[in-house]
Image (cartoon, rainbow, N blue to C red):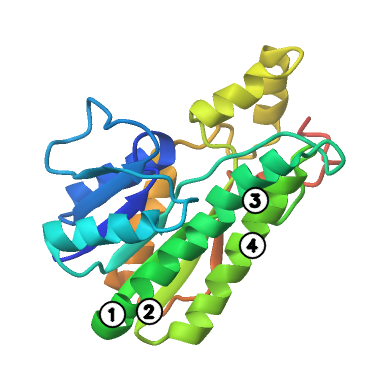
Amino acid sequence: MTGHTAIVTGGGRGIGRAVVERLRADGARVLTCGRGDRPADLPGDVPWVRADVARPGEVERVLAEANREFGPVSLLVNNAGVQVERTVTETTDADWDLVVGVNCRGTFAACRAVLPQMTEHGGVIVNIGSISGEVADPNMALYNASKAFVHGLTRSIAVDHGPAVRCNAIQPGWIMTAMAEDGFALAGDPEAARRDALARHPVGRFGEPADIANAVAWLASAESRYVTGQTFTLDGGLTAASPLNPGLF
């Protein structure tokens, strides 16, 4: 990754933080952003921009800071995301503004901001989608739809902006982050919910943020130079298993 200048949105924790650390370890110059203050344990050579990708003009400010620090951006990882657990009829306008704002508008705006530079200098975009964009998690209608948008946007960018720009997406399954822990906490019996979820994974474990970071690093590298417009599922076999399989559940 030496020579890459990368922006990772939502890189303060979880998957985003693992991506920041992996790209940095591989030699990339990395800038990240988030809605809160700079994390105390973020490495000093990783610039932090406090920004909300859902707000107009914010991603352009992030890009300007990356250009000032490192020069033209050659890698964008759209990781920032939020979720709301409600059905369609339960979803409010405020829920729409939050989830569509971050997951859809933020991802779209970041891609739109970097594409002129990448078209001129070459570049790679990796979007973090979700298996929820392919199979519907219950009570998460808005989140499911927002991730399907990310997958569709990925294909359009690959078609419209190749060959200068490659664009791919990763759709994680259960990755143990604070967001996943919050999901278990909402269950009536969190431990039973955790056991049930784990039983659905043929690999016998939940994913870790580093599992996603490894895939991002490959998609950003020259080893994947023939890969674009694709969505890669990293879910421990969750969506491969039949719900009727007696060995699971």
Looking at the image, is mark 4 or mark 2 nearer the viewer? 4
Left or right of residue 51, residue 88 in this image: right
Crowding near the residue tagged with mark 1, few <14, some 14–19, many ≥20 C-alpha atoms within 10 Å: some
Name the quadrant of the N terminus. Answer: bottom left
Mark 2 residue type = Val
Q: Which residue is mark 3?
A: 131
Q: Position of residue 155 (x, y in %)?
A: 56, 75
Crowding near the residue tagged with mark 4, few <14, some 14–19, many ≥20 C-alpha atoms within 10 Å: some
| Residue at the image point whose x is 45% and y is 36% from the top | 208
Mark 3 residue type = Ile
Of label 4 and label 2, which has the lower sequence position? 4
Disc 2 secondary structure class: strand
Of label 2 and label 1, which has the lower sequence position? 1
Q: Which residue is mark 1?
A: 122
Of label 4 and label 3, which has the lower sequence position? 3
Looking at the image, is mark 4 or mark 3 nearer the viewer? 4
Q: Position of residue 89 (x, y in %)?
A: 87, 40
Do labels 4 and 2 touch, CB within 8 Å?
no
Do labels 2 and 1 touch, CB within 8 Å?
yes
Crowding near the residue tagged with mark 3, few <14, some 14–19, many ≥20 C-alpha atoms within 10 Å: many
Disc 3 secondary structure class: helix
Q: Which residue is mark 4?
A: 149
Mark 4 residue type = Phe
Q: Which residue is mark 2?
A: 165
